[in-house]
């Protein structure tokens, strides 16, 4: 059965979207939709098999910045062990959100479409079901070929493409029992807080006292390089400075609500100045 993600948005945000968002159109016809579906299948397969050339062949040369970001993204995803990775457009959810201004931005393209693209991926050994995220790819058709030109064109409408830690920096992956630790690798990137895994194990033991529903008890711990990265990953509109960490899951809705892609996101600013001399257990 095809499983679709649905986000629960705060009431005020929903109202803002109703006021600001363009009226969705049916968008691309059947032939174009088939071409876009094939494009996404090739892109997802390239991620799984590690074929950089095939991955970059899905990217339009419309923006040097986007091309560079996509090349870095592919390289960083190579550090992950993925059991699955899929991309699929849900035309029914919002339709085609491309506005006249978006079409004008790609004046050399014969057609432009911005539907919601659902990204699903599972980290090997940790995700019993794939995590589900929304991406707002701009698809453009040039010389009969559909490619991805951008993923930020709807930011002004707060339709943000999901961001993962590997969108910002290369990741160092450590696996310890019930936990996977994702640390950024960059100049001035924070080290893992001393005792982070020991603290996580203690917290995991206490969860059983309060959470009776069955779950896999295997959780990735993400350490963003900076609080701004954390805020973008959460798509938070509030100050994250008062929080040490966030428990984060994506949501799948079929006949009920199912939480997937469980993550713990640490706030790096909460650990500034602490000693990094301790060794992770």
Image (tube, rainbow, N blue to C red):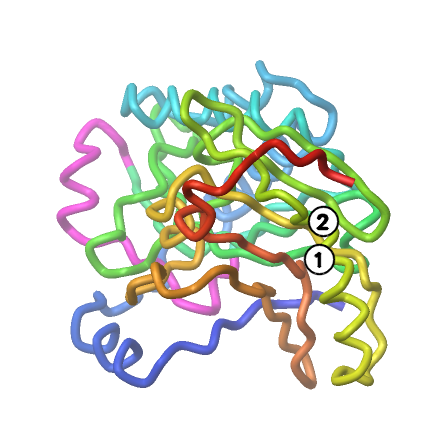
Q: Secondary structure at mark 2?
A: helix
Q: Which residues are magenta?
A: 90-110
What is the distance, in whole Å, between disc 1 and disc 2 at their CAs?
A: 5 Å
Q: Quadrant of residue 10?
A: bottom left
One can see residue 28 in this view: no
The picture quadrant where one finds residue 257 is bottom right
Circle 1: element type: helix
- Is 101 on the left or on the right of 195, as rendered? left
| Residue 174 percent location from the top left of the image | 73, 35
Rendered location of residue 14, percent (x, y): 30, 79
Residue labelled with disc 1: 200
Above/below status of 134 relative to 258: above
Q: Does the magenta segment cover residue 97?
A: yes
Mark 2: few, some, or many residues within 10 Å (few <14, many ≥20)? many
Look at 39% across and 41% down and name the residue there.
Answer: 226
Q: Do labels 1 and 2 touch, CB within 8 Å?
A: yes
- Residue 189 in sight here: yes
* Quadrant position of residue 25: bottom left
Which residue is under mark 2? Answer: 197
The quarter of the image holding the C terminus is top right
């Amino acid at each position: 059965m095809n499983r679709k993600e649905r986000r629960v948005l705060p009431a005020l945000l929903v109202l803002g979207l109703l006021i600001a968002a363009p009226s969705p159109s049916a968008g691309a016809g059947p032939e174009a939709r088939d071409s876009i579906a094939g494009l996404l299948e090739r892109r997802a397969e390239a991620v799984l098999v590690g074929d950089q050339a095939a991955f970059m062949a899905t990217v339009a040369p419309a923006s040097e910045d986007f091309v560079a970001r996509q090349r870095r993204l592919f390289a960083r995803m190579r550090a992950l062990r993925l059991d699955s990775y899929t991309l699929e457009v849900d035309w029914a959810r919002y339709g085609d959100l491309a506005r006249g201004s978006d079409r004008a931005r790609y004046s050399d393209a014969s057609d432009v479409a911005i539907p919601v693209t659902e990204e699903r991926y599972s980290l090997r050994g940790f995700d019993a079901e794939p995590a589900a995220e929304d991406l707002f790819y701009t698809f453009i058709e040039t010389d009969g070929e559909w490619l991805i030109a951008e993923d930020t064109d709807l930011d002004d409408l707060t339709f943000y493409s999901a961001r993962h830690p590997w969108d910002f920096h290369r990741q160092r992956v450590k696996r310890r029992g019930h936990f996977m630790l994702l640390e950024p690798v960059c100049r001035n990137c924070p080290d893992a807080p001393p005792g982070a895994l020991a603290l996580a194990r203690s917290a995991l033991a206490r969860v059983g006292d309060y959470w009776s529903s069955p779950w896999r008890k295997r959780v990735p711990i993400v350490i963003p390089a900076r609080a701004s990265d954390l805020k973008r990953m959460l798509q938070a509109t509030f100050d994250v400075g008062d929080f040490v960490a966030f428990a984060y899951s994506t949501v799948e809705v079929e006949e009920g609500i199912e939480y997937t892609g469980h993550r713990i996101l640490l706030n790096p600013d909460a650990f500034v100045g602490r000693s990094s001399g301790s060794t992770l257990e």
